[in-house]
Amino acid sequence: MGDIDSLAEFLAVAVDAAKSAGEIIRQGFHQKKNVEHKGQVDLVTETDKACERLIFDHLKKHYPEHKFIGEETSAVYGTDELTDDPTWIVDPLDGTTNFVHGFPFVCVSIGLTIGKVPSVGVVYNPIIDELFTGVHGQGAYLNGNPIKASSQTELVKSLLATEVGTKRDALTVNTTTNRINSLLFKVRSLRMSGSCALNLCGIACGRLDICYEIGFGGPWDVAAGAVIVREAGGLVFDPYGGDFDIMSQRVAASNGHLKERFSLALRETMEEHQS
């Protein structure tokens, strides 16, 4: 896992990178955006690209021997597969659609895996100036103060977050909304903030009780958040109840109490719509 000193240094370097990228996001947030379409509703901006360059240059300068996986330029910078080597997994701007619309749920997400285990996580929302950090075995923090997942034990009193994703074919949209429809009868309410990384941080600090997402972009959405949730006493798992796989494009997270209840509820939604 790396010793405590090296983990502390990895964290400090990642925080520096996130804050520098956050400054670019903050400046761009209030200006006219130049937007490209990756898909029908999947957007990328000049700010995404500038932030990724800055973050990777910063990390490479300190750790030239580490591996890198990033959202915008994986092909240029590094690798698509996760090995046991220390690997930085970066989303330079999670919540691009929010960014384009001036909706303040945007963040930089920087995670480090060692031996494939998420070990350091930094998620920074520069618009509301919230810095979430977590280091394996050392707790999770928001702006330097310790955070803990909620203590809610009842599904019916829980706040659930999810996302609809970027695909707009009828099958995906219907599957996604049918699932939400079923779950709404079992939880208190639903939120869609537009950022997977910030949803995970919401679990870590107790704002949310459960979140899940099926079919998101890639490991960069979850690498940092997974550390932060676990260090805050929450659980990260496969939505259908198995172990979390960082490369699977499926994630669920909850406080320490709701995992089994939620997995059961989610399986029931599948059965309802198959019958």
Image: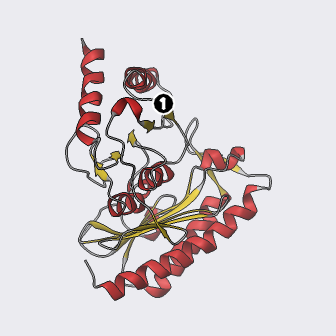
- Give the answer, above or below, for where 252 lies relative to 197: above
Position of the C terminus, as image quadrant, is top left
Q: Which residue is drawn at the image coordinates 61% and 69% (left, top)?
A: 21
Q: Residue furthest left?
A: 242
Q: Which residue is disc 1 drawn over?
A: 189
**Position of 117 compared to 14: left or right?**
left
Q: Which residue is drawn at the image coordinates 36% and 81% (left, top)?
A: 7
Mark 1 neighbour density, 10 Å: few (under 14) some (14–19) many (20 or more): some
- Give the answer, above or below, for where 86 lies relative to 168: below
Q: Which residue is drawn at the image coordinates 38% and 25% (left, top)?
A: 183
| Depth order, front residue of 210/28 | 210
Q: Quadrant of residue 45?
A: bottom right
Image spot of residue 265 (x, y percent): 28, 28
**Position of 191 compared to 1: left or right?**
right
- Secondary structure at badge 1 equals strand
Q: Which residue is drawn at the image coordinates 24% and 28% (left, top)?
A: 267
Image spot of residue 46 (x, y percent): 67, 59
Position of the N terminus, as image quadrant, is bottom left
| Depth order, front residue of 130/122 | 130
- Give the answer, above or below, for where 228 lies relative to 152: below
| Depth order, front residue of 147/105 | 147
Q: Quadrant of residue 241?
A: top left
Please state which amino acid type lies under the numbered disc 1.
Answer: Ser
Query: How many numbered tags mark residues here?
Result: 1
> Can residue 43 be seen in the rendering of this structure?
yes
